Image: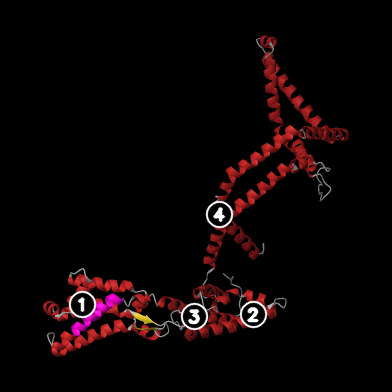
């Protein structure tokens, strides 16, 4: 949804007016789409609506079923005038029996998809008479003996309450020259709204183009792409999109929480597959490099085999190694020197314990304590001298050159041995298999990560950044 940006009051009033009009249009569209399926409800509860809206949908009373109901109404009037046993009533009952049989045979409900209504009528008559034949049930019901025996008032009330409303729901809908049911909603109701929205869109596009001279008319039109749904005469239910956006822009309804949930759902759906695709793609590229021997050539830094692009004239591997050596020698080793001395003293003690004469000397008083002091001093001296030698080797220029030469010779010897076919092939095979195992064992685990939790963490980070910017930090 669109973000709530500052809008001047006159513009806000106009946005709210147009959003209200679009909402009214959407409600009319929904009513029109639901009218035919819900017409039975409107006919029972709000018959005035059907009288107004039936002509718009090309709906008329069905002549056959309406004739049937008119005959029953005439029968009621005749009975009230001459009584149930009069010859006139007998004639009218014969006519209604004939119409009942024709209604069952011709099924006038089928044309508008209401055959189920006829089945309900037949079932109610079967239950009333207690006969499995619908035709016989109607014939029995519309007979003088049956009506006299069961009571005219009772039976006609049953018909008017249980059967007549079902028959009255049937209708005839006219068909146009295109072979489709007539529907006048477009030009009687919707066209006025469409023309209004078209004029509004034209004005908006012209305004957008004036604000952005580099825009073409098409680009300016796509700026308001969602308004196009208000103009098309088909798939009118899609107008819910521009209506929702307009309501949000006009600040009538806040749809930001829904927008966040929709975005989160979209991200969650794509994140899992995207994670797999990206990681598998990277691993496949690494495997391809291993197969082509590029990884090995890179490790060996052989410029003749592969041109190497240097962006800062610095050997990063050597620089990193130098930093690590400096940190270890000047920061780490002094802190762990007591532990090194204790470990070395322990090893010296064990070495002396292996000498037979030393075991015999332990029996003399004071020898054991003196030996422990000697071992401690010896371990301290060895550790100190070794540390000093390492520091001197690092700080001594000649020692540094010798160390660099040793490193270079080591690298060359390692490279020469690695380039042997069996060693190189074995390393490449092991690396390739290792990456394949990573794909099989860990990629699925990455894709199953709690995406909702990640999105929530990202949202919290953004909220924190926004609050800091707002507070001027």
Spatial CA span between label 1 and label 4? 62 Å
Question: On residue 158, which mark appears?
Answer: 1
Magenta span has 96?
Answer: yes
Q: Residues within 10 Å of mark 4 (few under 14, many from 20)?
A: some
The residue positioned 63% from the left and 48% from the top of the image is 280
Q: Could you tell whether 68 is left or right of 251 in the image?
A: left
The residue to which callout 3 is attached is 25
Dot placed on the residue nearer the N-terminal end, 2 or 1? 1
Dot placed on the residue nearer the N-terminal end, 1 or 4? 1
Q: Are marks 2 and 1 in contact (CB under 8 Å)?
A: no
Dot placed on the residue nearer the N-terminal end, 3 or 1? 3
Spatial CA span between label 2 and label 1? 63 Å
Is residue 372 visible from the viewing direction of this image?
Answer: no
The residue to which callout 4 is attached is 451
Q: Which residues are magenta?
A: 92-106
Foreground label between 4 and 3: 3
- Kind of element beneath mark 2: helix
Quarter occupied by the N terminus: bottom right
- Kind of element beneath mark 1: helix
């Amino acid at each position: 949804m669109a973000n709530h940006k500052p809008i001047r009051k006159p513009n806000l009033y106009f946005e709210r007016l147009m959003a209200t009009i679009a909402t009214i249009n959407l409600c009319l569209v929904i009513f029109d789409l639901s009218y035919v399926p819900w017409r039975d409800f409107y006919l029972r509860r709000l018959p005035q609506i059907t009288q107004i809206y039936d002509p718009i949908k090309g709906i008329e009373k069905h002549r056959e079923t309406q004739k049937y109901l008119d005959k029953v109404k005439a029968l009621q009037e005749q009975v009230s005038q001459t009584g149930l046993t009069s010859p006139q009533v007998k004639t009218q009952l014969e006519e209604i029996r004939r119409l009942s049989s024709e209604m069952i045979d011709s099924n006038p409900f089928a044309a508008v998809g209401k055959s189920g209504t006829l089945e309900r009528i037949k079932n109610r008559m079967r239950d009333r008479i207690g006969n499995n034949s619908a035709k016989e049930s109607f014939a029995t019901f519309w007979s003088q003996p049956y009506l006299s025996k069961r009571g005219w008032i009772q039976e006609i009330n049953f018909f008017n309450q249980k059967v007549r409303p079902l028959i009255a729901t049937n209708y005839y809908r006219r068909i146009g020259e295109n072979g489709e049911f007539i529907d006048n909603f477009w030009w009687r109701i919707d066209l006025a709204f469409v023309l209004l929205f078209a004029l509004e869109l034209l004005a908006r596009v012209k305004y957008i183009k004036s604000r952005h001279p580099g825009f073409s008319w098409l680009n300016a039109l796509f700026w308001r792409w969602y308004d196009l749904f208000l103009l098309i005469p088909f798939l009118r239910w899609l107008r819910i999109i521009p209506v929702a956006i307009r309501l949000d822009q006009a600040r009538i309804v806040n749809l930001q929480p829904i927008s966040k949930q929709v975005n989160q759902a979209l991200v969650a759906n794509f994140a899992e597959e995207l994670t797999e695709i990206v990681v598998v793609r990277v691993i496949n590229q690494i495997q391809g490099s291993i197969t082509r021997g590029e990884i090995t050539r890179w490790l060996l830094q052989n410029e003749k085999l592969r041109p190497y692009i240097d962006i800062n004239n610095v050997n990063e591997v050597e620089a990193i190694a130098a930093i690590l050596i400096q940190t270890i020698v000047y920061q780490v080793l002094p802190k762990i020197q007591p532990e090194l001395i204790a470990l070395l003293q322990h090893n010296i003690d064990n070495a002396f314990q292996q000498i037979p004469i030393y075991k015999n000397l332990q029996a003399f008083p004071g020898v054991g304590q003196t030996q422990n002091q000697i071992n401690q001093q010896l371990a301290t001296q060895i550790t100190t001298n070794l540390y000093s030698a390492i520091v001197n080797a690092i700080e001594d220029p000649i020692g540094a050159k010798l160390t660099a030469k040793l490193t270079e010779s080591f690298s060359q010897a390692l490279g020469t041995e690695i380039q042997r076919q069996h060693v190189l092939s074995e390393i490449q095979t092991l690396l390739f298999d290792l990456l394949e195992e990573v794909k099989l064992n860990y990629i699925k685990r990455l894709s199953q990560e709690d995406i909702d939790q990640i999105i929530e963490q990202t949202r919290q980070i953004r909220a924190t950044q926004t609050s800091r910017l707002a507070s001027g930090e």
